[in-house]
Amino acid sequence: MKKILALVLALCMVFVLCACGSGNSGTTSSASPDAAASSDTSAASTDTETVAVTAVIIAADTVPEDVIYKFTSTIFDNLDAISEQHAKGSEASLEQAASITSVPYHPGAAKYYQEKGITVEAVKEGAGTGSGSALTFGTGGEAGTYYAFGGVLAQYVSSNTDVSVTAVSSGGSQANIEDIAAGTIQLGFVQSDVMSYAFNGERLFTEPVKGFSVVAAMYMEQVQIVTTDPSIKSVADLKGKTVSIGASGSGVYFNAIDVLESYGLSESDISPVYQSFGDSADSLKDGKIDAGFIVAGAPTTAITDLAASKDVYLVSLDEEHILQLLEKSPYYVAYTIPAGTY
C-alpha cells in the first residue's frame, strides 16, 4: 500500500512540474518576439541623432528694465525649485541663457547676467523704459513643452515677486513674435531660428520685426521625426509617405523643409499635411499619417501621450546630413536624444 501511495505522489509531482514548465515556456514563446522587437528598435530603447534649435524667452522692448530683471533673477536664482516642478528647469544655465548672439538682450536681463559675471553679446538700446508689471506670456499649444514649462515659470515668478505673469496658450513662435509686436502680449517663447527670421525679415517675415529683445535662452528643442511604422528608418524613407510638417509657415515647417532638402527631398516628394503637435500625434494614433515632424524639448507631451497607446519610433539623421545642416544653417546644433526619453 505504501509503495502504491509513493508511486501516486511521484506521478503527481511529475505532472505538476510539467504543467509549470509548459506554462512558463508558453509565456516566453508568445512574448519574446515582441519584447525583442521593442528592445531593438523602439524610441524608448535607442539613441536618436538629430539637430536642435534653442527655446528662447523674448520680451517686448516696452517692458520696464526692473520688471525683466526681477523675472530673470527669480528664475535663475531658483532653478532647483523650478526643476522640481518641470524637468526643463534642470536644463537651464546662466551660460546658455546669455549665449544668444543674433538678437540683442533686454537691458533688465543683461543687468542680471552682468551681476553674475557674464557679458551678453549686445544690449537693446532704448528698451526697458516702459511701465507696468503685469505681463502676459505667450507659450505654445497645450500639447507642447512651451505651454507646460511657461506655466511653471509664470506661476513661480508671480508667487515670489510683485510681478504678475499670466501664461497663455498660443500658436507658437511666429504668433508670439507677432503678438508682441501688436502689443497683446509682453513675453513669449520662440525658437531661435524663428527669432532670427523675425529680426532679419526672412522666411516667415516679409520685413524685420524690431520691437523685441532677448530675456534668456532656456533649453534645446530637438527636431523629432516621429512614426509608428518601424520600417521608416531614415529621412529618405519618407519619400512618398504622408508626413505632417507642422502648421503651414510655422517654424516647424521650415525645420522640416531644411531636413528634407538635406536629403535631396522637397515638399512635393511627400504627401504633406500641415498640423500642430497635438494633431500630428492624433493622426499618427489613428493611422492617418505615416510620420510627423515635432520640434520641441524632449520629452514632448504629445509624443509621450502617443507612446502610452502605440509603439513610437524616432527617425535619426546620419552624420553626413547633420553636418550639411550645420554648415547651411548655423542656428542648428547636433543633438542626441537619449534612449529612454520615451
Image (spheres, helix red, strand yellow):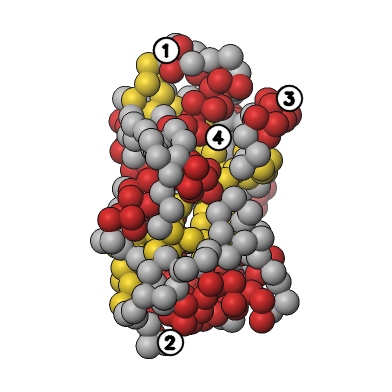
Q: Position of residue 168 (x, y in %)?
A: 29, 62
Q: Position of residue 320 (x, y in %)?
A: 73, 25
Q: Residue at x 50, y 42 (%)?
A: 200
Q: Position of residue 95 (x, y in %)?
A: 69, 65
Asked whether the beta carbons under mark 1 and mark 3 sit within 8 Å of each other, the answer is no
| Mark found first going from the N terminus, 2 or 1 | 2
Q: Is residue 242 above or below residue 16?
A: above
Q: Residue at x 66, y 42 (%)?
A: 333
Label 2 and label 1: CA atoms lie apart by 51 Å
| Mark found first going from the N terminus, 1 or 3 | 1
Q: Residue 307: in sight, yes or no?
A: no
Identity, as a three-letter code, of the amino acid under mark 2: Asn
Question: Residue under circle 2?
Answer: 160
Residue 314's disc is: 4
Asked whether the beta carbons under mark 2 and mark 1 sit within 8 Å of each other, the answer is no
Label 4 and label 2: CA atoms lie apart by 39 Å
Identity, as a three-letter code, of the amino acid under mark 1: Ser
Question: Residue under circle 3?
Answer: 320
Label 4 and label 1: CA atoms lie apart by 22 Å
Q: Residue furthest front?
A: 126
Q: Characterize the local packing of mark 2: few (<14), some (14-19) or many (20 or more) Cα atoms within 10 angstroms.
A: few
Label 3 and label 2: CA atoms lie apart by 47 Å
Asked whether the beta carbons under mark 4 and mark 3 sit within 8 Å of each other, the answer is no
Q: Is residue 187 above or below residue 220?
A: below
| Mark found first going from the N terminus, 4 or 3 | 4
Identity, as a three-letter code, of the amino acid under mark 4: Leu
| Mark found first going from the N terminus, 4 or 2 | 2
Question: Residue under circle 1?
Answer: 268
Asked whether the beta carbons under mark 3 and mark 2 sit within 8 Å of each other, the answer is no
Q: Residue at x 52, y 66 (%)?
A: 125
Left or right: 214, with 5 as reference point: left
Label 4 and label 3: CA atoms lie apart by 18 Å
